Amino acid sequence: MAKGKIATDTEKVLAPEDQLESILKTTKEDHYNYEEAHDYKVGCSSLLLTSMLSGGLGPGAHRFVGLASGGKTSASLDFMHHFLNDRSRKRRGIFIKSEGRLSEEIRDRSGIKFVYNTSEWADGTCFVFESNIYEAVFKLKRDLITNNPTNTEYFFITDSVDSLIKRDDAKKAEDESITVGGGSLITSVFLKKVGLAMAKRGHVDIYISQIRDQIKINPYEISVPKQGKASGPRALEHQADVVIEFLPRFGGDLIHEGEKGSKVVGHFAKAKIIKSNNEKNMVEVKYPIRYGQKGGRSVWTSYELADLLQLWEIAYKPNGKGAWFELEPNFRTEMAASLNIEVPEKIQGVNGLRQFIEESEPVQKYLFDRFKDLTM
C-alpha cells in the first residue's frame, strides 16, 4: 500500500509477524532460521577446564593459542576424543595437518583412531588431511558441512592456522611477497562465509595458532587493550566462540613423584580462558598432565579428583593432622551403595587417595560425574 493511501475492505493488511514470515520464505537461501539447531557441549578429561567452560565446547569455531609445547594440540585432541566417544550420534573427526606435528607419540596419547585412507574413515574415527593450502582445506570443510545428507556431526582441528597459505602464494618464488598474516586472514574470510552454518548444524571447529609479542619502539606509547595474543588479524578472535590461551610452564609447574627434586612424572598445563559464552573470562585453569600415558589418559584425572575431594572436605584429616584421610560418612555410604562396592573408611596419604581412584574405573567415573554435577 502506497504511503498515505487509505486501506479499503478489499485490501489485505499483513500483520508484522506475517510480513516477517513472508520475508523469511523469500530469503530462505540466505538464512538458517528454518534449520533445527544442534545444541550440545563436549567436555575434556579435565573437570576443572570443562567446568570453567560451563560443560565444554559447543558447536562453532574456537581458537587455541599459545607458545610451542604449551598443550594446544593435546587439548584439542582431548576434546575430539570425548566428542568421538559419544557413539549415540553420528560423529567423525578431521585433523588438518598443515605443519609437521601429529607424531606417532601424540596419536597414541590421544586415544583417537586416525585414518589416512577414505575407505577407513567411519563414525568414531578421525581422517588426517595433510595440506596447508587454504583453498583445499576450506573446500573440504565447506563441502562436508553444506552437503551432509547423513547429518553427521564433524569435529575439525586445523593445526595450525599460521601454516596455511594461498595456492597462488605457494607457487611464488622465494623473493616474491606473500600475504602477511595470511592464515588468520583467510580463515576469518572462511568463517564469514560458513561460520554460522558450522555452529547451527552442530560442527566443532578448532583453530590452533601461535601467540604474538607486541614490539614497542616508544615505551610511553599508549596501547590499545587486547584480549589475547593470537598471531594474525584480530577478526578471527571475534568470530570464535571460545578463545583459550595456553600459558608457558616453569619449574614450579612440574609434578614430582615424591618430594621436590625427585623424579618428574608430570606437569600442570595452564590455560587462560580469554573468551567464552559465560562470565568466566580472563581466568586461568591449571590441570595435571601425567607422562607416559596412552589412550586418552594424559590428563591426570585421579590427581584432579583427589584434590577436589580435599577441597570439598569429602576427604579430610581428622584435626587436620596425620597421614590418613577419612571419607565423609554419608558420601562414602552413598558411593558404596551406588557402585555396590566396599569403600574404605580411611585412606593413607594423597598418593593412596589417588591410587584408590585410579584402580577402579567405576569409582573414577562416579566421582567425575558427581563433581561435574556440583561444579556446573
Image: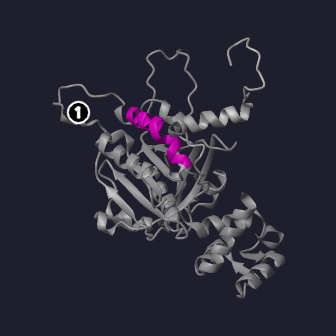
Taking depth in this image into account, of 215 and 172 the one nearest to the observer is 172
Characterize the local packing of mark 1: few (<14), some (14-19) or many (20 or more) Cα atoms within 10 angstroms. few
Residue found at x 55% / y 66%: 300
Taking depth in this image into account, of 58 and 69 the one nearest to the observer is 58
Magenta-highlighted stretch: main secondary structure?
Answer: helix
Task: Where is residue 283? Give x, y as percent.
Answer: 64, 44
Task: Where is residue 172? Give x, y as percent.
Answer: 18, 31
Callout 1 secondary element: helix
Residue found at x 65% / y 71%: 350
Part of the protein shown in magenta: 184-200
The residue pinned by badge 1 equals 168
Find residue 116 and report its image quarter: bottom left
User: In this figure, what is the number of numbered marks?
Assistant: 1
Task: Where is residue 290? Give x, y as percent.
Answer: 50, 65
Q: Is residue 328 above or below residue 144?
A: below
Q: Is residue 178 magenta?
A: no
Residue 246 seen from this side: no
